Amino acid sequence: MDRRKKILVVDDDVDIVRIVTKMLSREEHEVETASSGEEALEKISLRKPDIILLDIMMPRMNGLEALRKIKDIDPSIYIIMITAFGDIDSYLDAMEWGAFEYINKPFETEELLRMINKTSLPA
């Protein structure tokens, strides 16, 4: 049985953060949130998450830039990119820079949970 996963939800849309946090908490995961790439970088330096759900379109530091910085810090963190403005270039960049998965908004709860459940944690 998989243990609870520490998940960091990074999105500047408070409604998305609220909905995803509620969904993940119901699944008994430990959830933290950040509203920017900069805040996400601060949080992972304090407490490494197992998974990061990372929005691409955010002010100042976008999700792709944050992805590169996070992977420089710890390449073992699973990162699922989330976007309402998906295009092939951002998908290819995200996958090249180490994203585990990529999902478009609006997404189905089951689809996101399947992605999260595909991650494996060290024993």
Image (cartoon, rainbow, N blue to C red):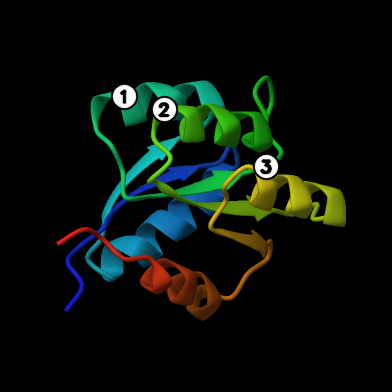
Q: Which residue is labeled 3 in the image? A: 56
Q: Which is nearer the N-term, disc 3 or disc 1?
A: 1
Q: Amino acid at mark 3?
A: Ile
Picture coordinates of residue 120, whole percent (x, y): 31, 66
Q: Amino acid at mark 2?
A: Ile
Residue at 43% x, 25% y is: 41
Badge 2 vs badge 1, beta-carbon distance below 8 Å:
yes
Q: Nearer the viewer, residue 56 or 69?
A: 69
Mark 3 or mark 2: which comes first in sequence? 3
Q: How many marks?
A: 3
- Estimate how packed mark 2 is, as few (under 14), some (14 to 19) or many (20 or more) residues with alpha carbons within 10 Å: few
Q: Position of residue 39 (x, y in %)?
A: 45, 24
Q: Are marks 3 and 2 in contact (CB under 8 Å)?
A: no
Query: Label 1, on which residue?
Result: 45
Q: CA distance from mark 3 to mark 1?
A: 20 Å
- SS class, disc 2: helix
The quadrant of the picture occupied by the N terminus is bottom left
Q: Amino acid at mark 1?
A: Ser
Q: Is residue 5 above or below residue 76?
A: below
Name which residue lies at 26% across and 60% down: 121
Q: Please tell me in which quadrant of the rendered image residue 91 appears.
A: bottom right
Q: Nearer the viewer, mark 3 or mark 1?
A: 1
Q: Decide: few, some or many residues near mark 1? Use Cα within 10 Å; few <14, some 14-19, many ≥20.
A: few
* Mark carried by residue 73: 2
Q: Does dot 1 land on a helix, a strand or a loop?
A: helix
